[in-house]
Image (spheres, rainbow, N blue to C red):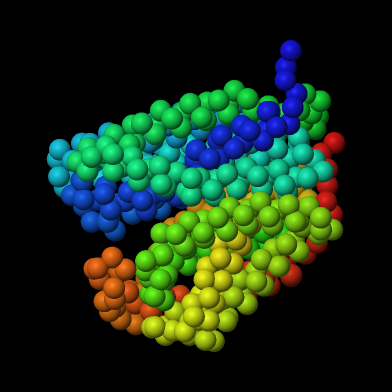
Amino acid sequence: MKVQNKWIRAAIPALLLHCSIGTVYCWSIFSQEIAEHIGFSKSATEWAFSFAIFFLGMSAAFLGNVVEKDIHRSSLIASICFAAGMAGTGFFIWYGGNHKGSILALIGIYICYGFIMGIGLGTGYLSPVKTLMLWFQDRKGLATGLAVAGFGAAKAIASPIMQAMLDSLGKETGIYKMFFILAGVYFVMMFAGHLLLAKPEGWHEPASQEKGARAMDVIKTKPVVFIGIWLMFYINITCGLALISQEKMIIKCIGLAGMAGVLASVTAVFNAGGRLGFSAWADTMKDRNTVYKIMIILSIAATGLVIVTQGIAKMGQPTILMVLVLILLFVVNAGYGGGFSNVPTLLSDHYGMQNISAIHGITLSAWAIAGLTGNQLATFIVNHVGSFSDISDGHGGTISVNPAGYQAVLYVTVGLYVVALLCSFLLVGGGKKKTAK
């Protein structure tokens, strides 16, 4: 007898999948160690993370049809690719440690962490989303928010564990051993999610639907709306990544170097909380697009306050300016997370549940492109505006920061947020909430 319970068949497997693949955001925990171990610069190894996010979006876009047709096949692909990519990354880190400066090691890490894991990320991210919306038809936002919150919370949960593993396994061998161990752990978690995941027994795909083949036809019924959602989603991710990629340095820059680790965990909580909170709140709204307007307006207001007060640029600023900068980081993280959890439900309100996995996958191409532009945009601005100076790192040493550069990033992001708000008002508009039939 099949178990027909929405928590066992949808919520728990979604969390098992998303809490595993969400650890891709732990890259910053061990990126420096990888660079030193294989004999390359940190900037060279950073591309592995960018490739992972790019192929996450691209695999979601191109494999959305596979997810639409068979969630068991797609969740199995996700489990195998993510674990294999992680194990392969461990192998090439080991190889690079024995052959310092080997280009083969660097390319191997790009392929394993970027391409192979990227496929696992994209299919794993999509697989539980439609299933959740079918099981929780009256609270679709809460359901998808719960899973996507797992993706966002994965970094906060896994980061201290990974750091402890690196410390206990030894500096020379710990980095690649950690990848081998985690590959096994995450495969077990994801495979368990794969076995449990199932659509409601009474759900049947529309008879007229060629599964996954008509997604573009559905999008073409409201092309302007889709363009608006895509642009809004892309801008929100780009702005979020631009600020999040610099947040540790910003925290240190405003005089809170000793609390940088704790505050980074707090911002991760806001990221996860925004995914769950904003999507659950949207369930109570007549028009789900309203929550995007709220998130974007809050981001504009918080960014504008720090721009007007020059909160980052003023070294040794009073407490009130520190608070404004922290509010900015919290708001942007929450809005960044909320953008992810609300996109599938917003799409379903406009296009219905027909081919929603494929349509959602195509929309995630925005994430792929933002993954290549968000961090790089901020890095370019910081490297070309203002100048670096040394300050205390809070542990007896010094670090180099560029307050004027971090401040300049805000001028670009606030402009982009305004464009996103215009997209929300002028292109997306309102959408009547639809339920699966």
Q: Quadrant of the N terminus?
A: top right
Left or right, 334 with reference to 158? right
Using the image, determine if residue 206 lies above or below residue 104.
above
Using the image, determine if residue 339 lies above or below residue 242.
above
Residue 122 rendering spot, x and y as whole percentages: 53, 41
Left or right, 437 with reference to 27? right
The answer to whether any part of residue 361 appears in the image is: no
The answer to whether any part of residue 200 appears in the image is: yes
Q: Nearer the viewer, residue 114 or 22?
A: 22
- Image quadrant of residue 353? top right
Residue shown at 36% from the left, 31% from the top = 181
Q: Quadrant of the C terminus?
A: top right
Residue shown at 28% from the left, 53% from the top = 32
Using the image, determine if residue 426 lies above or below residue 172.
below
Using the image, determine if residue 122 lies above or below residue 318.
above
Left or right, 383 with reference to 231? left
Left or right, 338 with reference to 90? right
